Image (tube, rainbow, N blue to C red):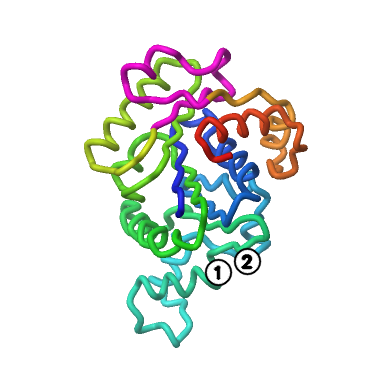
Amino acid sequence: MVKKIASIGRGGVGKTCFIAGLARVLADHGPLLLIDADPDQNLAEAVGIDMGGEGLKSISSLLFDVKAGRLDPRIEKAPLAQKVDYLLSRQGLYEGDRFDFFSLGTKWTEGCYCQPNNILKGLIGRLEAGYRYVLVDSPAGLEHLNRRITVSLDDIFAIIDASKKAMDNALRAKRIAEEIRISFGRFFLVAGHGRPGGCPAAPAGDSGFECAGALAVDPAVARLCMEGGSLFTLPESSPFLESVRAVARAAGYL
């Protein structure tokens, strides 16, 4: 059965690094799909995918092609969802040896992200059955929860730093998910690189959070982020990877 996992949190706390590290840890434990739902599009780089070099486009870019009429004549009269599925299979979905990947991308036209998000929601529903794990790298903030990119998740990981704002963000995210009826199983806190000392003890007891651990500070990760390198190049002995494995074990994935 597929397990859907998402990272959330404020900007800069390490959401993308966590998902990339978790992908590295879980890559040999069943078919894996990575989804970059963040318009900033950092996950591809973090897992070693050159979108341009692979000839890949984001969901937003594919929608722009549809609206601009840049289509194979054979699908011009097909419903929108079929057009996107057709284009995704040829230009949007990275299919690798260790994981598959696609990206929401940056909005190229005026208006909100409603249509790309709705398309993404449908794609997740149609694709997820073929995978053991689906990992979603969410945008910073809370607005994406209101868009309900996915209506059900098994586990949510809130990556937090040392600030009170980070805990407030996690509390609001959990409340919003409950209020708009996003179904989720567990809501974990993970202390990011900027939170020495690990998860706070008190909130977990009275808010329904589970503390899954802390991400280790690793100079190699900082270097790769600066250089645009892939976290899949980290050695097995990496302190960061060891800390992600510990989180995965705490969540019961390993």
Considering only vertical position in the picture, is 212 above or below 24? above
Q: Which of the image's four quarters has the C terminus? A: top right
Is there CB contact under 8 Å for labels 1 and 2?
Answer: yes
**How far is mark 1 from mark 2, CA to CA?**
7 Å
Residue 55 numbered mark, or none: 2
The reply to whether the magenta stretch includes residue 145 is no
Give the residue displayed 46% in from the left and 79% down from the top: 71
Q: Secondary structure at mark 1?
A: helix
Residue 65 relative to residue 18: left or right? left
Q: Quadrant of residue 18?
A: top right
Task: Tell me the residue that label 1 is attached to.
Answer: 91
Report the magenta residues as a range. Answer: 187-212
Q: Residues within 10 Å of mark 2 (few under 14, many from 20)?
A: few
* Residue 197 falls within the magenta-colored stretch: yes
Give the label on residue 69, or none: none
- Determine the image quadrant of residue 42: top right
The crowding category of the residue bearing disc 1, from other C-alpha atoms within 10 Å (few below 14, some 14 to 19, many at least 20), is: some
Q: Give coordinates of residue 249: x percent, y percent.
A: 57, 33
Residue 170's spot in the image, x, y percent?
38, 27
Q: Amino acid at mark 1?
A: Gln
N-terminal of the pair, mark 1 or mark 2, is: 2
Residue 124, percent across and down?
41, 58
Residue sitting at 70 percent across and 44 percent down?
A: 232
- The N terminus sits in image quarter: bottom left
